[in-house]
Image (spheres, helix red, strand yellow):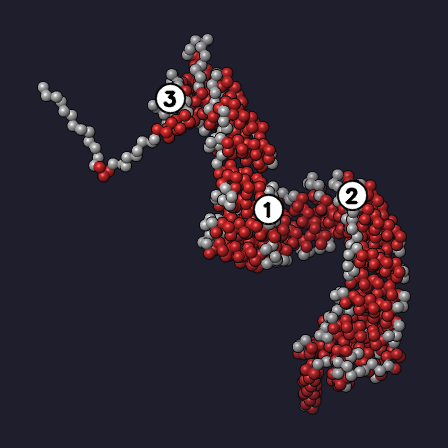
Amino acid sequence: MPPLCLPPPSRPPPSTLPPQRPPPPRRFMSRLLPRITALPSRHRSHNPISPALAESLAQVLATRSTNPAWARSLAALLPSPLSDGRLADAVESLPDPDLALALVSWSRSHFCRHHDADALPAPTPIAHSALLHLLARSSRLDAVDATLQDMSLAGVAPTRACLGALVAAYADAGMEEKATEMCQRVREQYGKLPAATHSNCLLRLLVERRQWKDAHKLYDEMLAQEGGADNYSACVMVRGLCLEGQVEKGLKLIEVRWGAGCVPHTVFYNVLIDGYCRRGDMGSALLLLGEMERKALLPTVVTYGTLMSWLGKKGDLEKIMYLLSEMRERRLLPNVQIYNSVIDALCKCRSAAQAMAVLKQMLASGSDPDVVTFNTLISGLCREGRLQEAERLLREAVRRDVNPNLFSYTSLIHGFCTRGEVMAASNLLVEMMERGYTPDVVTFGALIHGLVVAGQVSEALLVREKMTARQLIPDVNIYNVLISGLCKKQMLPAARNLLAEMLEQNVHPDKFVYTTLIDGFIRSESLDEARKIFEFMEQKGVRLDVVGYNAMIKGYCQFGMMNEAILCMNSMRKVGCIPDEFTYTTLISGYAKQGNIIGALRLLCDMMKRRCQPNVVTYSSLINGYCKLGDTDAAEGLFANMQSEGLFPNVITYTILIDSLFKKDKVIKAAVYFEHMLLNQCSPSDITLHCLVTGLTNSMACIISSNCSSTVKMHEKHALLDIFKGLVNDKWDPRNSAYNAIIFSLCRHSMLGKALDIMNKMANKGYSPDSVTFISLLYGFCSVGKSRDWRSILPNEFRRDQLEIASRYKILFDQYVAKSVGCEVSSALQLYLEECRSSRQLEHKCASY
């Protein structure tokens, strides 16, 4: 028989064969093979656990406390012999670790029932490792120790992967000691660390807790082990260093691993940029952004988000908007966090209108605003007083299913209270509580602060009582606001009672509380009470700041106790508190009021020696001191010196000089300083007005006998004296003449509002405005381009003949105003007189019929 010839096995055409790889060289294989460690054999069943079987197992195990036959049902589902692999499959199929624990326990008892009593259950390392994996994933770490003990008694060692999973689980749960202990167990049992993914969890925990020595030790050990560290490990360390502000150390760590000038990934750049931003070094952060682009690493949304968030905190709106436009150029869509940063920055710059425009852009781009977006906008609108818009935004948030929180309502409650709309604030508080939010200390604090700002201190105290009824203890800020409000209302006994209540509630008053009380008692001229508070504060070990000491020094100076005031300043220096310009100015003012100009000048020299620059109030106090002594020449010298220092006199400075010069019959100089005051648009106060009227009337004889007119420039003419003199010579009432001269002086300097205010005050004092008053005001209306509005202030009983009388002074008044203003006054008067004439003619015609 011929031999049987079998056909060759069919092969695909050569074109379809995969390319043949050459066998690896022996040298490569010899280096690779020793590193390959055989895994424990996993004798899986040929019949894996199906979903239906897994569901049945779970149902049976779940009824073990109520079903006496559960063990038999389980045996039917998992018949003997039950291998380690089959049991592991069953454990892995269960979602609940309690069911898995019950299954492993049943397997041991099931073995004992079917074998001799002396026989030990077969070790189940794979099943126990699967159980430990499940416990780690489910964070059921309470059952880990018992499982490990069972494995130890059975002589079974958990796998490295299993122990690594436990290291990660303990670390994720924040159990540093247990995670470290489990990591050490892996070292001892397998001679190496857990896998990088598991070791990274412990490394992250150590970095988060600033355990730098242990973190560096673990990281170095991971680097020394092949495959023991990955990019995430390095990133964890770099981020930790950056959080500590040690960005340079983070960069060095990167260079040690990858080489100088080599940052391997965008993620590392993001971490470094965040580190610089946290340190406030925005310049270096922006330089890194440029470096990324040069290395062709494109910035991500996270990169821009980090930069814009920190720029927003610094209020650098210009750079934020530039980065936002750059994102759009790169076709990167901003996320909600970036939009929130932009909106927050705009609101901080009081540009809520622009922030609302950004919200519209956000909605148009398909990005949904979150509660932070709405809260930021609501807060920004409330700060700008746009409460109705803020409330509409709250309703919009509710419509969009964005649940407002405590912060949403708190801003609105504070805003409405500040504006005095307590009912609206109360309605919002009720609405907030209906939504399930319980007002906290911050909410009550906002309500109390708003009420105090609105002057409703009694209502604020009632809110504080309701707060304590809810077992909420007011914090130091709430007490400070209440005490401040009570002091402003001169309710000082109540303020002291609040201080006592603070101490009883173990709420420690801070320096602001004590300063508020001291200042309140000083303002009410209760120096003894202020001293008691000051001494009590020192006993409690609370160190005042410069504001507190200044309040006490002000009290001593107010009562003329200059020695005590100086001693208080010396005490300041002893505790390291440096006196400021207010301290020196208060003391200088105290000496000046006593006429001790030498003491005041000595303090001024000390002030300048210590590089503390005098301010307008300092000079005004010294000028006042010289004026009290009658030395107006020295006062004028100080006035000139103040201006040479670049300081602008205020209304108090001018008033002191004008009053003193009138008292010394230096009327021309007084008029010059009044003119200087108006040229600088410094509006006279009621005291200035009183000094001018009194000075003019008392110096009437001197003014009439003097020749005040001159041929100097328009704004250097003595309009005040010339007008007053002309009116008095025509037998007008001296005080009315003084008021009219002042009103005209204000009008020629376009200070119409103040002139109208003085006209009203003139009437309230019993000096009725006359025709000269109204023609003076016409110059004011014409100087601001509102001549048509002049008629609105004319009384109904104002007669044409009165105006014709006043018109005689137009020649005098025109000398002190621009020609264009004089012409406009003439036109307005002519038009008014013609209308009066036409009206009178019409009345005559009607009467004749």
Q: Nearer the viewer, residue 189 or 517?
A: 189
Q: Where's residue 401, x and y in %?
A: 52, 48
Quadrant holding the N terminus: top left
Mark 1, residues whose alpha carbon is within 10 Å: few (<14), some, or many (≥20)?
A: some
Badge 3 is on which residue? Answer: 43
Q: Where's residue 804, x and y in %?
A: 75, 86
Count of numbered marks: 3
Quadrant holding the C terminus: bottom right
- Give the amino acid at mark 1: Arg
Q: Nearer the viewer, residue 309 or 404?
A: 309
Q: Nearer the viewer, residue 693 or 565?
A: 565
Q: Which residue occupies the extreme bottom position in the image?
A: 848
- Give the amino acid at mark 3: His
Residue 542 circle label: 2
Q: Does dot 1 land on a helix, a strand or a loop?
A: helix
Q: CA separation, marks 2 and 3?
A: 75 Å
Badge 1 is on which residue? Answer: 278
Q: Is residue 694 above or below residue 552?
A: below
Sequence-wise, the earlier of marks 1 and 3 is 3
Mark 2, residues whose alpha carbon is within 10 Å: few (<14), some, or many (≥20)?
A: some
